[in-house]
Image (tube, rainbow, N blue to C red):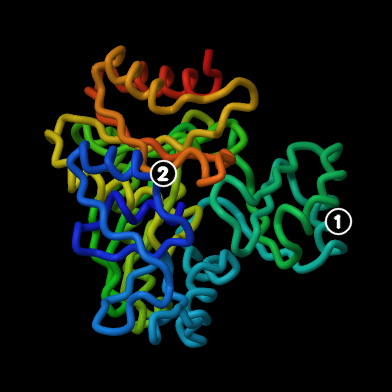
Amino acid sequence: MEKLFFPISNAEDYILVEENPSDELYSHWKTKGLTPGIPCGTGVLLEGVTFVEWGKRHHFEEGELVIDPIQLEASRYLNSKVTQLDFRKNHSPLKAKLITSEEHLFAELEETKLPIVLKSEYGLAGRNHIIFKTHSDSWKISQVNKRLFGFPVVCEEWVGDSRFFDFSTLWDVKEGEFFYLTSTMMWIDPDGGFRGIRIGGGENEYQSLFLSKVYDLVKDLNNLVPKEYSGPCAIDGFLYSENGITIVQPVSEFNFRYSIGRILWEVRNKRKPKTETVSGLLVLPYPKQGKLDEWSLLGRLETELNSELILLTPVRDSSGKPYQNAVLYFEATVEKESTVVETIWSSWTDPI
């Protein structure tokens, strides 16, 4: 994922990476009208640079990344789901609480109405969570240390079966003040796993329902977000149905960093498609069976779907070992969007 800065960079930028992108991928970006920066390693740049990273934890000193204790503490504070229980207080329709130990969790499972979901304090959205639907799921307690990295964890009501629309609002934060950029729609699988995200195609049909509630939430963050923080933020939320009524969860988590949605927004700005064109990113797992020839597949799919496709991350490392996931950008009309998404997904994950 470190290479996702290449597609949103300018030609004069330097991108700090452990392994350079392949010549084939670098040429692919240029062919698609992007302006990838120059790959470099630590020790190359010594002075006179403006340093940008996924989340603010370091400073750049004599060509090296050095942990900044103040920025690290601020990052831990802002991105902690434990901290965020205070951020979202009075704005979430779903009950959530802190679980501090295995004994506490056992007691909670006995007393609380299921289903619930446990979330790691610093886990990634759609990955580091455990769902308890019935009491027979109690065996999953043994997974807490491995999947959630131990306690404390956040326990929240789970409404996955009635959840029907996931969104993310994107913001720039300057000295603690929030500036709205756009909203996106996310594709989430039934177990809460993240599949992709999209922007464009006209105004979102649900935006009028959720955006005002997210603005109300942001107004209450003035005294909670340190004035020292400046950078990107994504606020994820969703809609679900209860007794035939649509309910807005304006925030399931905050991401004070470059999110996958922010990458999509930046790439779309570089591409400058028409307003009615849909832009999307798909996070595609390497196929469990079969061998993937990504360049041949992309060429075939572009012709078949009449859609622009851009591979934003490499499929494998320099030794040929496949990465777990690759990120693919696409453009499509609203009418063809579903066909494009499903065709790409099936063709990629189950190659012939």
Q: Position of residue 269 (x, y in %)?
A: 18, 47
- The residue lying at 42 percent from left, 40 percent from top is 327
Q: Amino acid at mark 1?
A: Phe
- The span from disc 1 to disc 2 (Cα, nearest Å) is 42 Å
Q: Please, what secondary structure does the residue beneath circle 1 have?
A: helix
Q: Is residue 275 above or below residue 248?
A: above
Q: Which mark is residue 268?
A: none
Q: Position of residue 8 (x, y in %)?
A: 27, 53
Question: Which residue is the site of mark 1?
Answer: 106
Task: Please name whichever residue, 352 or 137, is drawn nearer the observer in this view of the structure.
Answer: 352
Does residue 198 appear in the picture of this structure?
yes
Residue 291 sits in quarter: top right
- The residue lying at 45 percent from left, 82 percent from top is 71
Question: Which residue is the site of mark 2?
Answer: 313
- The residue lying at 43 percent from left, 61 percent from top is 17
Label 2: few (<14), some or many (≥20) within 10 Å?
many
Does residue 185 appear in the picture of this structure?
no
Q: Position of residue 196 (x, y in %)?
A: 43, 37
